Amino acid sequence: MATYNTTSGNTRLRVLESAAAVFAEKGYRDATIAEICEHANANVASVNYYFGDKRHLYDLVWRHAHKIATETHPLDACLSDDALPEECLYAFVSGMVKRILSKGPAGHFQRLMAREIAEPTQAHMAIVEEAIRPESEWLEKIVKKLLDGNGTKDQVRLCALSVISQCLFLNLNKLGHERDFKGKGLKQIEVLAWHITLFSMAGIREVKNLTKGNKS
């Protein structure tokens, strides 16, 4: 893992960004303060001085990582309030896929979440409430519109789960996708996002048709 080439600049920020990279790669339990500080070109005492301890550092890291992911790849793509639900669904999927496949800081949050799923930490419930739940509720709102407001709570939830599962699967097969997308960059990511969106809309449309059939 690369280290910073300079000891100048904002030490606190360097440690925070390095911690995000190390936690994302190794998970909370296996990441060490020594490795984080080596990555940041900072003294080990920096963590205690700026953050108190590893647990507090992690709490700040996942919030910092989520902020970067949200600003870099917003799941609403800053669409207007009157945007079509199909546009909103593509924006959500595209933003999520870009986050997951990003190798830089914008991808740290999703890699942290992959670690959280495998090995939940003491921060898990806070992450769910502050970061995951609002995004899930936004996706469910989109799905509800695609169902013309007629879907049951369970149908909306399950459709949203089906959409996000296709995105999160990319976290499980990163090496395969990196190989498949090599040299294709953003264009291939957009193709993948469109496929997930169209595939999801077809499924949601079928659920909507079944709902209408049951009411007739």
Image: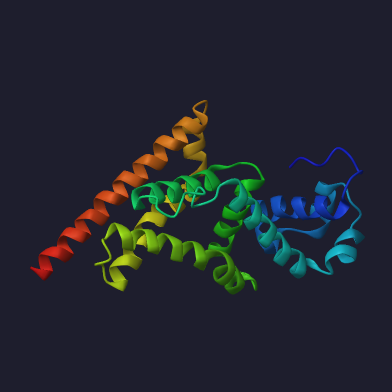
- Residue 19 lies, in percent from the top left, at 75, 55
Pick out the residue farthest to the left.
216
Q: Please identify the quadrant where the C terminus is shown.
A: bottom left
Identify whether 107 is placed above or below 112.
above
On screen, residue 162 versus residue 100, left or right, reads left
Q: How many marks?
A: 0
Quarter where residue 161 is shown:
bottom left
Q: How is the image coloured?
A: rainbow
Seen at 83% across and 65% down, the residue is: 51
Quarter where residue 43 is shown:
bottom right
On screen, residue 13 versus residue 214, left or right, reads right
Identify whether 3 is placed above or below 162.
above
- Residue 147 lies, in percent from the top left, at 26, 60
- Residue 33 lies, in percent from the top left, at 81, 59
Seen at 15% across and 62% down, the residue is: 210
Quarter where residue 131 is shown:
bottom right
**Nearer-the-camera pick, 74 or 159:** 74
**Nearer-the-camera pick, 64 or 112:** 64
- Residue 175 lies, in percent from the top left, at 52, 40
**Nearer-the-camera pick, 185 or 83:** 83
Q: Please identify the quadrant where the N terminus is shown.
A: top right
**Nearer-the-camera pick, 118 or 158:** 158
Seen at 70% across and 54% down, the residue is: 20
On screen, residue 159 versus residue 21, left or right, reads left
